Amino acid sequence: MSQSTTFTILLGGELRLTERLRDAVSGSRFIAADGGMRHAIALQVQPELWVGDFDSTPADLQAAFPNVPKQPYPAAKAATDGEIAVSEAIDRGATRLILAGAMGGERSDHAIQHLLYGVHLAEKGLDVLLTSGDEEAVPFPPGEFTLALPAGSLFSVLGFSDLTGLFIDNARYPLRDFHLPFGASRTISNVAEGDVRFSLGSGRAIVLARPYDLSGV
């Protein structure tokens, strides 16, 4: 078995196969969460584990992957299938997690929970990317990082608390040592001028980016 410490968790939300998605998951290991297994067909991968209560998994999908080990859980469990899949990945040595299918879909409660959970995982020291293929989310704990984006693409910073010492560079609307009150919309719908540099003094945030949406050009 591959010893990669990058795991892609296949979740039940929307997923479009894009070049950035292909690049992100290349060489990773895969764990499917219930109906998220359908994305394994599009990605042409064979996950090493399939977890869940299988309440959203049609019989034909189960028949398509007869050799993938299943780890069933009762429907009345204390965590989502996605959280169980992440825990399995961490137990197998994951240091980077790609939550594919984490955004969009019919369940906004799941999508919001994935964003919050991604921030929690980042605070534990894991490298996390949430993606639908078209849209990406990167947790933004205190510190610095650079996000590779095409010039003209849209991105937003969502604060899950007050943010202090916020810097955004190489964007149409740069910020320097900014205080963003919780719930404020100042950092919604910015435009990348290429790779965007971020820095945060304190707070909890996530960067939502639309790399294929060049409406900001």
Image (cartoon, grey):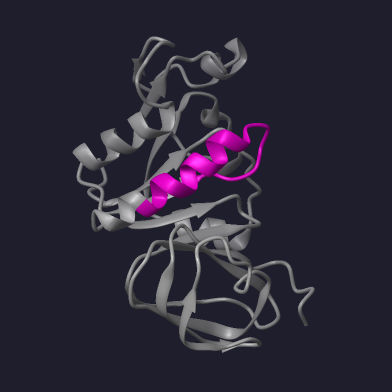
Tell me if residue 198 comes above or below residue 184 in the rendering.
below
Residue nearest the observer in this picture, 72 or 209 = 209
Task: Check residue 201 for magenta coloring.
Answer: no
Which residue is found at the position 46% from the left and 57% from the top? 160
Residue in the foreground of this view, choosing between 97 and 70? 97
Main SS, magenta region, reads: helix
The residue depicted at 60 percent of the width and 50 percent of the height is 132
Q: Which residue is drawn at the image coordinates 70% and 67% (left, top)?
A: 212
74 w.r.t. 32: above or below: above
Q: Quadrant of residue 151?
A: bottom right
Q: Which residues are magenta?
A: 100-119
In front of the other: 141 or 95: 141
Quarter occupied by residue 110:
top right
Task: Answer above or below: position of 92 versus 58.
Answer: below
Task: For residue 101, say whether it is visible.
Answer: no
Number of numbered labels in the structure image: 0
User: Which is nearer the eye, 136 or 175?
Assistant: 175
101 drawn magenta: yes
Quarter the C terminus occupies: bottom right
Q: Is residue 85 left or right of residue 185?
A: left
Q: Position of residue 158 (x, y in %)?
A: 54, 62
Query: How far from the left and from the top, in percent, is residue 149?
Result: 58, 76
Name the residue located 37 percent from the left edge and 16 percent from the top edge. 77
Give the quadrant of the N terminus. Answer: top left
Most distant residue in the front direction: 181
Which image quadrant is residue 171 in? Answer: bottom right
Position in image of residue 44 (x %, y %): 54, 40
Q: Position of residue 183 (x, y in %)?
A: 56, 60
Q: Is residue 175 visible?
A: yes
